Image (cartoon, helix red, strand yellow):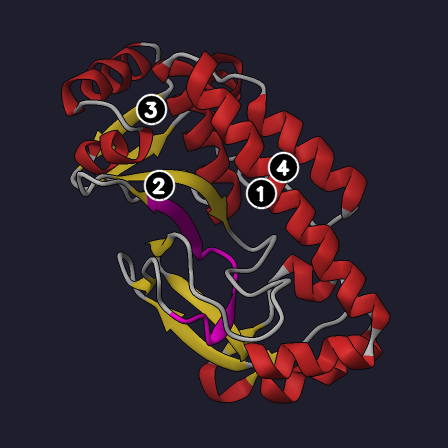
């Protein structure tokens, strides 16, 4: 396994997509990787923005893709954590962003210019294959999200989302207000309040100001639909070992 550090920023590389690269391939990108810290609620791209950089979240950073509707609502379509990358993964050159990319859980990341990534792809067929396969996995997540939103209950979707977030940030504290949760699920706040209240009564979660604390991750998995597991299986098949393992089972 590749290990890499950025001493000036005090970072150790913790992105499974980059770690899945062959050492020679990673060496093509490493000189161009810029370390940075992403603050919560930072918008990386708005719809129509020119994509200039590809972002790789490091553990425990979590970023969401949201589609902005005509009335201004922004509905979440995909989550990306340490297993992947944000924007410009398979495009050739700078293209406009279709969705909003916003930081849900703050933390470290590295980024590379799209020109540098394209240059590395031209030098390495295996880099092209890796990112093409990852793009297929992201599409699978989006497809599953569409089916999930159309067929599963808000309770199932809420449980699924909390499981996905908890696994990616490796922490049982999910920084999220109920109002934000409602917007992401595309439902009213009162509906989310009832769902979270039901979870609390069952001992699955508790709350604090600006956050939801997961107390029983296995219980949430039982309450959730199987969409998360379907996406995980596809990740495991297409990119074996890239999808993050849960590091918080013991905490639950």
Q: CA distance from mark 1 to mark 4?
A: 24 Å
Please give the residue where the numbered disc 4 appears in the rendered image: 140
Question: Percent position (x, y) of residue 66?
Answer: 36, 45
| Label 2–label 3 contact, CB within 8 A | no
Mark 3 Cα within 10 Å, few/some/many (few <14, many 20+)?
many
Q: Residue at x 43, y 65 (%)?
A: 96
From which residue to which does the magenta span run? 50-67
| Label 1–label 3 contact, CB within 8 A | no
Q: CA distance from mark 2 to mark 3?
A: 10 Å
Please give the residue where the numbered disc 1 appears in the rendered image: 247
65 is within the stretch colored magenta: yes
Question: Percent position (x, y) of residue 146?
Answer: 48, 27
The image shows residue 223, relative to residue 92, as above or below, that is above
Secondary structure beneath disc 4?
A: helix
Q: Of callouts 2 and 3, which one flags the residue occurring earlier in the amino acid sequence?
A: 2
Question: Percent position (x, y) of residue 77?
Answer: 43, 39
Q: Of callouts 3 and 4, which one flags the residue occurring earlier in the amino acid sequence?
A: 4
Q: Is residue 51 left or right of residue 191?
A: right
Please give the residue where the numbered disc 3 appears in the rendered image: 205
Q: Of callouts 1 and 2, which one flags the residue occurring earlier in the amino acid sequence?
A: 2
Q: Residue at x 72, y 32 (%)?
A: 233
Please give the residue where the numbered disc 2 appears in the rendered image: 173
Q: Residue at x 66, y 77 (%)?
A: 118
Q: CA distance from mark 3 to mark 4?
A: 28 Å
The quadrant in which the N terminus is found is bottom right
């Amino acid at each position: 396994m590749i290990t890499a550090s950025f001493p000036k920023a005090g970072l150790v590389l913790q992105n499974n997509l980059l770690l899945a690269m062959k050492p020679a391939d990673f060496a093509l990108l490493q000189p161009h990787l810029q370390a940075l810290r992403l603050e919560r609620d930072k918008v990386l791209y708005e719809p129509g923005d020119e994509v200039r950089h590809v972002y790789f979240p490091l553990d425990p950073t979590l970023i969401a893709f949201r589609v902005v509707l005509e009335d201004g609502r922004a509905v979440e379509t995909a989550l990306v954590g340490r297993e992947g990358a944000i924007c410009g993964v398979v495009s050739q050159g700078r293209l406009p962003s279709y969705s909003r990319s916003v930081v849900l859980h703050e933390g470290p990341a590295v980024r590379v210019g799209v020109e540098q990534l394209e240059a590395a792809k031209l030098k390495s067929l295996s880099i092209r294959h890796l990112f093409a396969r990852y793009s297929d996995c992201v599409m699978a997540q989006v497809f599953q999200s569409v089916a999930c939103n159309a067929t599963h209950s808000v309770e199932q979707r809420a449980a699924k989302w909390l499981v996905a977030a908890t696994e990616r940030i490796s922490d049982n504290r999910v920084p999220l207000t109920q109002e934000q949760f409602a917007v992401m699920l595309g439902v009213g706040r009162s509906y989310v309040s009832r769902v979270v209240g039901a979870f609390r009564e069952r001992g699955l979660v508790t709350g604090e100001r600006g956050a939801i604390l997961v107390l029983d991750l296995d219980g949430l998995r039982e309450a959730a639909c199987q969409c998360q597991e379907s996406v995980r299986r596809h990740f495991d098949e297409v990119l074996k070992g890239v999808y993050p393992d849960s590091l918080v089972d013991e905490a639950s």
